[in-house]
Amino acid sequence: MSLQHTLNAIGPLDQKAMAAARARQDTLTKPPGSLGRLEELSVQLAGIQGKEKPQIRHKAVFTLAADHGVAAEGVSAYPQAVTAQMVLNFLRGGAAINVLARQVGARVIVADLGVASPLPQHPQLRSHPVAPGSADLAHGPAMSREQALAAIETGIRLVEGELPQGLDAVATGDMGIANTTPSAAIAAAITGLPVARLAGRGTGIDEARLAHKIAVIEQALAINRPNPADALGVLSKVGGFEIGGLAGVMLAGAAHRLPVVIDGFISGAAALIAAGLCPQAKDYFIASHVSVEPGHRLMLEHLGLKPLMNLDLRLGEGTGAALAFTFVEAAARILSEMATFAEAGVSEAGPNPE
Amino acid sequence: MSLQHTLNAIGPLDQKAMAAARARQDTLTKPPGSLGRLEELSVQLAGIQGKEKPQIRHKAVFTLAADHGVAAEGVSAYPQAVTAQMVLNFLRGGAAINVLARQVGARVIVADLGVASPLPQHPQLRSHPVAPGSADLAHGPAMSREQALAAIETGIRLVEGELPQGLDAVATGDMGIANTTPSAAIAAAITGLPVARLAGRGTGIDEARLAHKIAVIEQALAINRPNPADALGVLSKVGGFEIGGLAGVMLAGAAHRLPVVIDGFISGAAALIAAGLCPQAKDYFIASHVSVEPGHRLMLEHLGLKPLMNLDLRLGEGTGAALAFTFVEAAARILSEMATFAEAGVSEAGPNPE
């Protein structure tokens, strides 16, 4: 679907299914509410799927890669060639996301949205580069508005391409050297918070390089003047191709009534773009974890999302989101597989004494 | 093994294996430290198993049940009969712990350490009651010192009985109406903190019943005067049979060099007993989550353990611990399955610029 069709297809959660799931939780053999956030999550899943007993079987992590012209400013600890090298590592199954996806029984969809170095053809690589890396946002727009739209629609098509194989939940992941820089710029543009609170050490830069990174982002915002009310404009001026692609994955997930499990800082920037294009899409989002990157917590607050985990992760690739699939699947199974008080012949709580 | 033999068998973590695992983490294709607590956990697992690449395949949740004489004081929202009813629910696979254990591929070991209501014979029920419920700790010791020892040694034997089927990690869980009362009493006795900070609403009692519960625990401590330096004495005076059994599971786990994944408030009380008997056992403990029960955080602080999750759980049974097996298994797999920079041909971080 086009972006416009996708946005039009995003509807509200099914309140009737949510009420049924909530009522069912209170009949299951446990003190009401005692499964905490798993119960909330189960109700959200019911609303997304429109069923009292949602089912999560087929799970996919979308790990989208692209390069960033701003890497030339020396904002990362790693050379740009690592983006392509890591894509090959994903395809060979040796990266952290491969290990964690195997652990939770999810498939990994690896896509090139705009990697600068040449990549070989590979049967598992979805090759949809918008351009060989974005332009340097410190000196002008990272991409054209048309390219921003193309990146988002590529993400939409990636999700739709997975539907025939079965898809009950999507997770988002990223690879792109220097991509915490556009992500912090997007967060600053949309939340209005100071860059110094949003930019962090990424893969591990020192104090001096962090100060330089902040200055680069401030310069990018001063030159490009993104309008926070125009999410597509923000993406084109200070974003990146994989960030646009991930926003498309999120919007397509919401349009197809799939839970969208969001990873860390870069996925958070994509979620800001997606929610800017369609606030209702947020109802489909599940924040997997809060990253070490200090701006991530602020992004999640702006989105009104509460992370499920805090494991001090700062890797990206979809690693936190993949782990959170365990909670998503467990929450759904509780509604289907737990016995009710009546079925199990278990006594319910008595009234509190007078 | 006897308790004394088990305590004697608990040794330090393997520092050489931990150093090797730590060094290996820094060669894997990710920024050093970027997997946060999963990296720390992998190093702990290496120290426990004495291997650079620990393996976690066979996982068991030990869900131990018993009744408590103090239930007669009206400290719980549920009637005592629920303990036995829930044991039957565990055996039929309809409880939350069954669902979550299936989700993570763990088996559930259900044991009767002292349920008051009669239970039928069942091939999956480990029937080792110390007595049909503990005595009411508000009026005297909950059990004799011999019974406390018997409960602990039952837990030890349960773990040892599972070794032949393969066992790489254990988790602890509990069922026992009113058992947050002895757990809070144990925590007060061992930490010296006020009862009002440690006792909570358990399965969901109101303000008036909570005040009564606090008064009951204070009375129990005043009458029994447990000595914090004598953990077996604390267990016998204000504990419960399943709590003793869980302390035994934890000590046997440490003695057999298995990671011990600890559930919520009742398991936390058992961990205080186990650590009181052998402080070194704590090196083998992994705190899965922090419970809604307010005393749980204080227990974990006293033990020096940092929980992996905060999902607002307050169910027990081993539910939080079962979910955390996912992290334990993932942490181990990262060391075995991720490619190194050299293997994958990925460039490492450059120096920070001068």
Image (spheres, coloured by chain):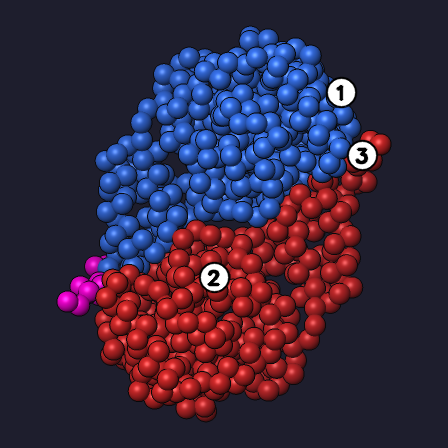
Chain colours: A blue, B red
Which quadrant of the view contains residue B242?
A: bottom left
The region drawn magenta spans A342-354
Residue A321 is labelled as none
**Residue B199 sits in which quadrant?**
bottom left
Callout 2: residue from which chain? B
Label 1 crowding class (10 Å Cα cut-off): few <14, some 14-19, many 20+?
some
Per the image, the residue denoted by label 1 is A72
Identify residue type, mark 1.
Ala
Mark sitting on residue B352: 3
In this view of the protein, which residue sits in the foreground, B321 or A275? A275
Q: Judge whether A195 appears above or below A314 on screen.
A: above
Q: Are marks 3 and 2 in contact (CB under 8 Å)?
A: no
Q: Chain of mark 1?
A: A
Residue A90 seen in render = yes
Query: Would you say A152 lies left or right of A339 here?
Result: right
Residue to which mark 2 is pinned: B297
Tell me the kind of residue under disc 2.
Arg
In the picture provided, is B144 more to the left or to the right than B215? right
